[in-house]
Amino acid sequence: MSVLRLAIPSPLRRQFDYLPPEGMSEADLAKLQPGVRLRVPFGRREVTGYLLDVCEQSDVPATSLKPALELLDASPLIDSQLLQLCQWAARYYHHPVGEVYSTLFPRRLREGKPQLATGTPGWQLTTRGKGLPEEALPRSPRQAQAISLLRQHAQIAGTRLKAQGISSAVLRSLQDKQLIEMCDISEHLHSVEIRPGLALNDEQATALQTLLAAGEGFSCHLLEGVTGSGKTEIYLQLIADCLQRGRQALVLVPEIGLTPQTLARFQQRFEANISVLHSGLTDAQRYLAWEAARSGAAQIVIGTRSAVFTPLARPGLLIVDEEHDGSYKQQDGFRYSARDVGVKRAQLHDCPILLGSATPSLESIHNVEAGRYQHQQLTRRASSGGMPSIRALDVRKQTLQAGLSDNLIAAMEEKLLSGQQVLLFLNRRGYAPTLQCHDCGWIAECRACDARLTVHRRRRRLRCHHCGATSALHRQCPQCHSERLLASGLGTEQTEDFLRTRFQQWSIHRVDSDSMQSKGAMQALADEINRGEPCILLGTQMLTKGHHFPAVGLVAVIDADALLFSADFRGEERMAQLLTQVAGRAGRAERTGSVLLQTHYPDHPAVLAMLSTSYGEQARGMLRQRQESGLPPAGQLVLVRTDCPNAEYGEQFLQTLRERSTPHLPAGARLIGPLPSPMQRRAGKYRCQLLLTAPDRRSAQAAASVLVANAETLSTRQGLNWSIDIDPQEVF
């Protein structure tokens, strides 16, 4: 008897056995390969399952086995290495294998729908367009440009036209005039043209030669380069080598906001088919990009966290830009680290992976010191401007206007008058973080979270930045009916209002998740800023991640104190990374920039370290402290969380889990808690956590297996959910 062993997307950490579909011949059964999709009954539903193996027997009685309903694929849509990656990720992160498999596929395929016949979407001239006189569109220069390009190349991918500045609106207009039509680009047209790169300095050239000399097999490299040192140029030249060998390159970026900028840089360098994958795409767009990567039609794939699972026909190089960024860790559901999964994937595909950052994570530095990663350093900027000077502004006893001191305002005016741009960093969006009654002390709080509501004056709303709940902005205190309501604290909206009054002659640009919601907003802003006209940029950490603004001469951190105090042991590392990244936006062209940190604690050790030492020196000092205390990366952490409408249920569940698991833990592993989460109530549910510490990865994995096995045997109260997080990034 043949039994199909399937992975089913469900919370159950097990595999499921089915009989082959009725009518399947032995010959067809012998052809089945792991990774094909099947439609199967699952409870009262029909779901898409993924074949793991064909077995001769099952632990389930044959009479209880149900037949699969339909074979959906003649052959697997993903290769064996990617299947191995899924199995590894399910084991390492202790997550249901079916849900891990489901991560690989776009929505259409997860729903069991067939593949679409796809090619690379492009454009070509119609018969009418071919006969159009050359001077027929004098009032539409972009339309005329598009027609000219199509006369030269016959067929052009839509991404290439966009790189030439031809928008979708221009193409639709030409389509309406029946001058052009959509087409699938033929395979033979997937040629690659590589434009010359920039000249490298000695450090860049040495790093590049070392990376190229490592060869095509697996190797992991950390490229540690100060901000503005030209890491992207090294990426581009490595990718050029990869494409010349007929291989594909996968590039991960931490956030969607960086994708347009990265895409533009790549399109300027490569005349190639580039696919982009991120959560901002429609299902159809995501499927087309995924299929282009899988088929090999896309030579370069750029994406955010989930793109690490994108199938590639000819993988040759993986790059993780800003590898330290916390956005690479999935914080719910399947809690994986895209950086760490990327390293494992490169190993399985036997190809190199490059991790790049100006502020590498302590985990990566630890791996360098342990000899697991190779290390290349860029210690100076590629431009002639040099590293910016950093100075602390003591704002004690100073009058502040919307958070700005007189000294900072004077420095801003000086830079603007000299034709330079100013960047102000304030990591707090909205108008003010608190709405308070001046008479009775009432504070506007979220009904579902242990958090205060943030004032958003532009939209006249109160918003919880944790669960997203909103309400109208109060005119009266609901407690005493006083109209003396105070917006306390500082947010980007409030500072923007002051800047527009104080600096009326210059443009003001606010950059946060509220102002950058529309599609293409970040790219449009970058285009405007890169024209080099003096202006003020005010924003949150969205401004700190990899953006290149060459005309910025002054960077100021409005409230450095907000970064100084954290209950999390990673707080110091994150503060150093954030401040270094913010400071790195200054002086990236010919002129040396300057950085000002406004603080009430100019003698704080973290502030003094920022002023006197490099990030690398700070990081290695922090790593020594972690090693002495046994904290990651020297030790390992595992976190079990619960959320439940009743606070007691979660604590009871974790307490029982601790009692059952403690006798079976490996040597050196210990449990801490259960304890309430730092924000105990969020989105109407009470959160509790149990922390496991272990001296090494092997014992952490063994202990995690004990916790999962015991947790699955415990009965849960209605509404209680539990999860396990391996290598958690948010602990306290």
Image (cartoon, rainbow, N blue to C red):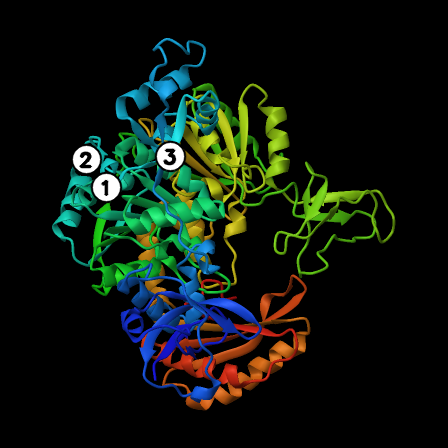
The reply to whether discs 1 and 2 touch (Cβ–Cβ < 8 Å) is yes
| Amino acid type, callout 3 | His
| Amino acid type, callout 2 | Leu
Q: State which quadrant residue 206 falls in.
A: top left
Q: Secondary structure at mark 2?
A: loop
Nearer-N-terminus badge (3/2) = 2
Disc number for residue 341: none
Q: Which residue is mark 2?
A: 200
Q: State which quadrant residue 246 falls in.
A: top left
Estimate the spatial distance between the alpha carbons at disc 1 and disc 2, rounded to whole Å: 9 Å
Q: Can you say whether 726 is above or below 373 in the image?
A: below
Using the rendered image of the protein, determine whether residue 389 is visible from the camera's viewpoint.
no
Coordinates of residue 371 in the picture (x, y in percent): 20, 63
Estimate the spatial distance between the alpha carbons at disc 3 and disc 2, rounded to whole Å: 18 Å
Q: Can you say whether 43 is above or below 560 in the image?
A: below
Q: Which residue is mark 1?
A: 234
Q: Which residue is mark 3?
A: 548
Which quadrant would the N terminus be assigned to in this image? bottom left
| Amino acid type, callout 1 | Ile
How many marks the image carries: the answer is: 3
For marks 1 and 2, give the one nearer the viewer: 1
Q: Pick whichever, 53 or 125, lies toward us.
A: 125
The answer to whether 699 appears left or right of 433 in the picture is left
The answer to whether 574 appears left or right of 454 in the picture is left
Q: Can you say whether 637 is above or below 466 in the image?
A: below
